[in-house]
Amino acid sequence: MVQSINLKALTTLASVVRRPYLAAPHVAVSNISEVNYQALRDHCNIKAVIFDKDNTLTAPYINSIHPNAHFGLQSALDVFGSKNVAILSNSAGTDDDFGHEDAKSIEERLGIPVILHKEKKPGGLEEVMLHFPNVKEPSELCMVGDRILTDVVFGNLHGMLTVHTLPLCTGEDNKGDNKIASWIRSAENKLMYGNWWGGRKIRENVLEHKWWRGQEECPLVIATRSEKELGSLFREEKKNEL
């Protein structure tokens, strides 16, 4: 599938430059299986979970679940139910997906719906809210994905609880990824998790979520990653991509 230019991300970039904390996730993990979905529901008033697809649930442009994401997806389904878990992708389910054939294939293979939407993330809120009739406001949603400027910014713009995950695939395993998207993601992660004053400052100014009171009061990560560990994982990711 050939992806068109994400105009929404480009136009939102100015907002992120003015308010860089929009790019800071509430929670950072190495993969979705580290998230405590029970705590999301019981202590954060989260009613539904939205996943990105490529490098969050699956390898890029592959429609079967990645082994490292299997436990996390099943946990989300067990806690929230299939009607309250969905995929919001910037490829499948968009106008780039002719006849939405890819979306149909993903739904068949993964067993969860793909939200159809016109505007790419960080757009698409209207379609998301229509998809979850039991959700009264965006703060009751959790957005999970590997892209900072699309997944995390989309969630933060609308008051969702945001979870950023490192990409499932690196190096040779990531050869099917969109080259431009891969390069931008690496730059995003370097800016966010690199050992420099700007990244540290952004991470210190995470937006407050309406219901979640922080990792110390309400742990949402099963296997806690320190900033140092996330930085090491990022450097390993970069090395594998060279």
Image (cartoon, rainbow, N blue to C red):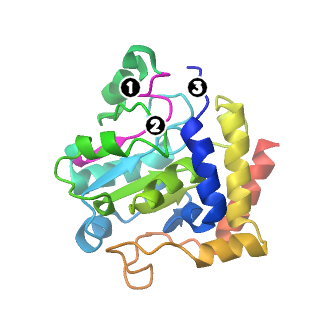
Residue extent of the magenta highlight: 84-96
- Of residues 98 and 37, the one nearer the viewer is 98
Dot 3 or dot 2: first in sequence order is 3
> How far separated are the C-alphas under marks 2 and 1?
9 Å
Q: Which residue is situated farthest in the right direction here?
A: 242
Query: In the picture shown, does residue 71 fall above or below 34?
Result: above
Dot 3 or dot 1: first in sequence order is 3
Screen quadrant of the C terminus: top right
Query: Is residue 90 covered in magenta?
Result: yes
- Of residues 240 and 121, the one nearer the viewer is 121
- Of residues 104 and 62, the one nearer the viewer is 104
Labels 2 & 1 near each other (Cβ < 8 A): yes
Q: Which residue is situated farthest in the top direction here?
A: 99
- The residue positioned 49% from the left and 72% from the top of the image is 207
- Residue marked by disc 3: 3
Q: Which residue is situated farthest in the bottom direction here?
A: 217
Rendered location of residue 34, percent (x, y): 46, 62
- Residue marked by disc 2: 89
Density class for disc 2 (Cα within 10 Å; few <14, some 14-19, many ≥20) is many
- The residue positioned 66% from the left and 60% from the top of the image is 17
- Residue marked by disc 1: 103
Could you say which quadrant of the image residue 183 lies in?
top right
Rendered location of residue 158, percent (x, y): 40, 58
Q: Give the structural element (helix, strand or loop) at label 3.
A: loop
Query: In the picture shown, does residue 185 fall above or below 139?
Result: above
> How far separated are the C-alphas under marks 3 and 1?
14 Å
Is residue 115 toward the left or the right of residue 151 in the image? Answer: left
Labels 3 & 1 near each other (Cβ < 8 A): no
Q: Give the structural element (helix, strand or loop) at label 1.
A: helix
**Amino acid type, callout 1:** Ala
